[in-house]
Amino acid sequence: MKKSVLTRYRVMAYVTGVLLVLLTLGVIAKYLLHMDGAADFTRVIGIAHGWLYVVYLVFAFDLGSKAKWPVGKQLWVLLAGTIPTAAFFVERRISRELEPAVEDAAPAVAKA
């Protein structure tokens, strides 16, 4: 497996995680604190998170299929983008698991 597959998954996990935390804070500000401007903030962040979550799903599915994960693990990783802060923990665990495999698959550099 190429390192780029893991890298793009990691980037999208962080982006999705940050947007979901911001969306959660926006919803709290909108419905519990009744703050002005929270509705617009929540709408913009919600749309961004929705579209980027789809990209996250594609990259996570690609990673899982190349890593040959069982269905349960694949679903666990795919759903991590829907639970605030879960994407950060799942990303770290997956990265630690797959980094040795990615490093072993890297081609050796020839010395001159």
Image (cartoon, rainbow, N blue to C red):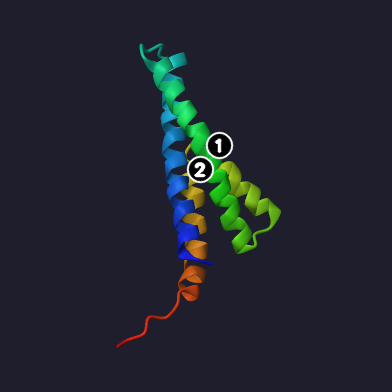
Q: Is residue 54 visible?
A: yes
Q: Position of residue 58 (x, y in %)?
A: 57, 47
Q: Height in image: 30 above or below 50? A: above
| 22, 33: nearer the viewer | 22
The secondary element bearing badge 1 is classed as helix
Q: Position of residue 97 (x, y in %)?
A: 52, 63
| 77, 9: nearer the viewer | 9
| 78, 25: nearer the viewer | 78
Q: Amino acid at mark 2?
A: Ala
The extreme front residue here reads: 112
Tell me the mark number nearer the camera, choosing from 1 and 2.
1
Q: Height in image: 108 above or below 70? A: below
Quadrant the C terminus occupies = bottom left
Q: Position of residue 70 (x, y in %)?
A: 69, 58
Q: Which mark is residue 82?
A: 1
User: Residue placed at 60% from the left, 63% from the top?
Assistant: 67
Q: Which residue is mark 2?
A: 86
User: Residue placed at 59% from the left, 42% from the top?
Assistant: 79
